[in-house]
Image: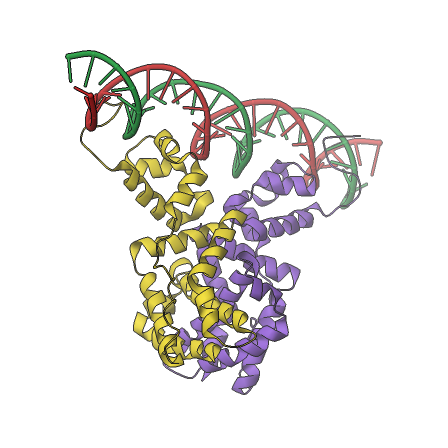
Chain colours: A purple, B yellow, C green, D red
Amino acid sequence: MSRTGRRPGAPDTREDILAAARRAFAARGYEATSLRSIAKQVHVDPALLVHYFGSKDGLFLAALEVTIGPSGLFGDLDALEVPEAAELIVGRYLLMLDQEPTRDVVLGLVRSAVSSERAATMLREFLTKEMLTSLSSLIDRPDGQLRASLVVAQLIGIAMLRHVVRSDAVVRASNDDLVSLVAPVIEGYLR
Amino acid sequence: MSRTGRRPGAPDTREDILAAARRAFAARGYEATSLRSIAKQVHVDPALLVHYFGSKDGLFLAALEVTIGPSGLFGDLDALEVPEAAELIVGRYLLMLDQEPTRDVVLGLVRSAVSSERAATMLREFLTKEMLTSLSSLIDRPDGQLRASLVVAQLIGIAMLRHVVRSDAVVRASNDDLVSLVAPVIEGYLR
DNA sequence: CGTTGAACTCTACGCTCGTTGAATTATCGC
DNA sequence: GCGATAATTCAACGAGCGTAGAGTTCAACG
């Protein structure tokens, strides 16, 4: 049982680390997550994380590097009528929050943004890139950007209540329930 | 220049500590705030905070103990027509976020809830007590509680974008702008 | 004016953290 | 098979943290 040195086989430890880190940051945020705790999950020495990613910060960046489509979540909605667009916005957003990697990215950013200016900036850029710009272009009005931001506010609020505060009604509601209640509201912002 | 022992005069150090703690927790959240940093702000030894409040946790609880009216933010809206109620909801909420003590309580809870189950529960109870129950009673429907939660989601989202993410459009918008855009949406949830 | 208790500080303990540098073991190209 | 290089662990550092206990100074009340 060799305790030190390289391991036999070809394990993709690097990916395991990234996955564990993403989960940990999503569950507790940057400050409350220690390199040691991530390392323990992967059964690896903490120093290995530093070796691969340079620092805790580097690991955070690598773990939350984003991979949604080229035009973001809502990039292809221009052609649609407003009611259909609204439904798709809510539906796709909720779907994203149900899927492992993207959900953890969003939650990791949210949970870290509240205590780190750095992460707040990352979240701002993520929201702008993935949601705000395509939403604003859907709204043909001088206050389009503000309206788009309020749509995002509604969506972020839902994530907060569902995953952070764990408010009863929102946790129990089905995605379809939420779509049918929230879509009309989004519609209001879009026109 | 006596460095140790009781100070002359009758300074209300205890209140100063609470105020500084509230500001600190609101700015950085529970985990990222150290007793030592709060103590430094008040020019006091960290041990004094422990002497007064027992522990960091105790200080957190004391600092964020809430003081809104007896019936919460929205307790007196039953009699109103829906459009007026909606405007008041948004207006009062934004006002609360402009005022020192209550804003810091909310932000402190939000910033701490993301990394502590404990604080998340406190925030859930705060939202229930101050907003959800009176809102649900405004909505005469089987899904009233879910609708009320979505109102809260919209409001929390606005606080997130304004104070945490610092999203441009939301930061720059005036309270009146926000009321006139958001109130109709709230109206939609209320009926 | 003396005593008691409250306000306040000092020192220090034990813990956890991020990070470092050297040592060890495996893989891969030649 | 050898040599380079990648993967991995170990032991330790310095710093910051929350907290405990003992000590010091003041105010209040008799």
Residue B146 visible from this viewpoint: yes
| Residue drawn where x is 80% and y is 43% of the image | A9
Counting from the top left corner in percent of width and height, residue A191 is at 45, 85
| Residue A33, position as x, y percentages in the image | 55, 44
Q: Nearer the viewer, residue B133 or A4?
A: B133
Q: Which image quarter: residue B60? A: top left
Residue depicted at x 45% and y 59% = B129
Residue A8 located left or right of residue C5: right
Q: Is residue A118 visible?
A: no
Up/down of D4 relative to B3, above or below: below
Q: Residue drawn at (22%, 28%), measured in percent from left and top?
A: B7
For the N terminus of chain B, give its image quadrant.
top left
Vertically, is B181 above or below B100? below
Q: Nearer the viewer, residue B183 or B75?
A: B75
Which percent across, then down, holds residue B103? 35, 56
Q: Please report the residue visible at 58 percent of the width from the left and 73 percent of the height from the top.
A: A178
The one of D15 and B70 positioned closer to us in this rendering: B70
| Residue B55 on image: x %, y % | 43, 35
How many numbered badges does the structure rendering display?
0
Corner quadrant of residue B176:
bottom left
